Image (tube, rainbow, N blue to C red):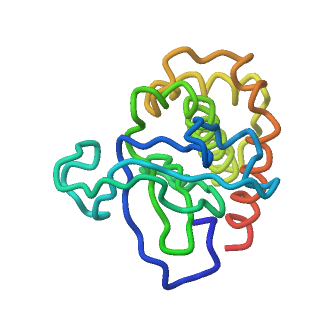
């Protein structure tokens, strides 16, 4: 997992979450606010990592203005895993589960980008493992065939290209690890 260098941080889930500034304005993680040193908080329900109902508020502890958020990251790029977005504070690494309805439009771009990164990584790794040539068109077709499996209902080449820079950065990190291992 990319993220904190602290190995002893607690891990938890957050559901029905929003990310916001000090004044309660909703913010998008892709806006670069954390990287610019702006303070970003989260509100939602914290749950145990192994909670059987991760999208439910049952057994969740309500939190308002948790954080501040130090960074965000993604994981779940291996075969059979689901891509997950997370945030890190001084206290813990939090896996973001179900956003609050008011926050869904703001997290959609990052969710889509993370899911597409996973698919592109899988397609490239499979081609590398089978020593097969992979053209852009072949890769695009394979990603399109799998898009619904990661929650992307409206896949197109334009969607892929919109996220190209972030996808390439994630692919480089994951493929380098794959090659080294």
Q: Quadrant of the C terminus?
A: bottom right
**Residue 112 in the figure: left or right of residue 157:** left
Of residue 165 and residue 78, the one placed in the foreground of this image is 165
Total numbered circles: 0
Q: Is residue 75 above or below residue 16?
A: below
**Residue 50 in the figure: left or right of residue 16:** left
Q: Is residue 144 above or below residue 121?
A: above
Residue 63, position in %: x, y?
37, 55
Residue 29, position in %: x, y?
65, 43
Of residue 34 and residue 158, the one placed in the foreground of this image is 34
- Outermost residue on the bottom side: it is 8
Corner quadrant of residue 12:
bottom left
Residue at image x 65%, y 60%? 71
Residue 128, position in %: x, y?
70, 51
Q: Quadrant of the N terminus?
A: bottom right
Q: Is residue 12 above or below residue 109?
A: below
Residue 34, position in %: x, y?
72, 54
Of residue 38 and residue 116, the one placed in the foreground of this image is 38
Of residue 10 and residue 68, the one placed in the foreground of this image is 68
Residue at image x 55%, y 36%? 111
**Residue 56 in the figure: left or right of residue 45:** left
Q: Is residue 2 above or below residue 141?
A: below
Corner quadrant of residue 162:
top right
- Outermost residue on the front side: it is 23
Residue at image x 64%, y 22%? 141
């Amino acid at each position: 997992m990319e993220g904190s260098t602290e190995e002893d941080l607690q891990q938890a889930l957050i559901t029905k979450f929003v990310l916001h500034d000090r004044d309660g304005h909703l913010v998008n993680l892709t806006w670069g606010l954390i990287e610019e040193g702006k303070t970003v908080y989260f509100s939602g329900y914290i749950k145990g990592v192994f909670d059987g109902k991760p999208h439910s508020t049952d057994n969740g502890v309500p939190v308002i203005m948790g954080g501040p958020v130090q960074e965000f990251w993604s994981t779940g790029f291996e075969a059979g895993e689901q891509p997950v977005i997370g945030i890190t504070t001084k206290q813990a690494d939090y896996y973001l589960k179900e956003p609050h309805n008011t926050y869904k439009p703001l997290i959609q771009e990052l969710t889509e980008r993370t899911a597409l990164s996973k698919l592109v990584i899988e397609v490239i790794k499979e081609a590398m493992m089978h020593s097969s040539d992979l053209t852009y068109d072949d890769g695009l077709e394979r990603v399109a065939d799998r898009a619904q499996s990661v929650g992307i209902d409206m896949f197109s080449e334009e969607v892929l290209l919109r996220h190209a820079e972030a996808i390439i950065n994630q692919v480089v990190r994951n493929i380098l690890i794959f090659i080294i291992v």
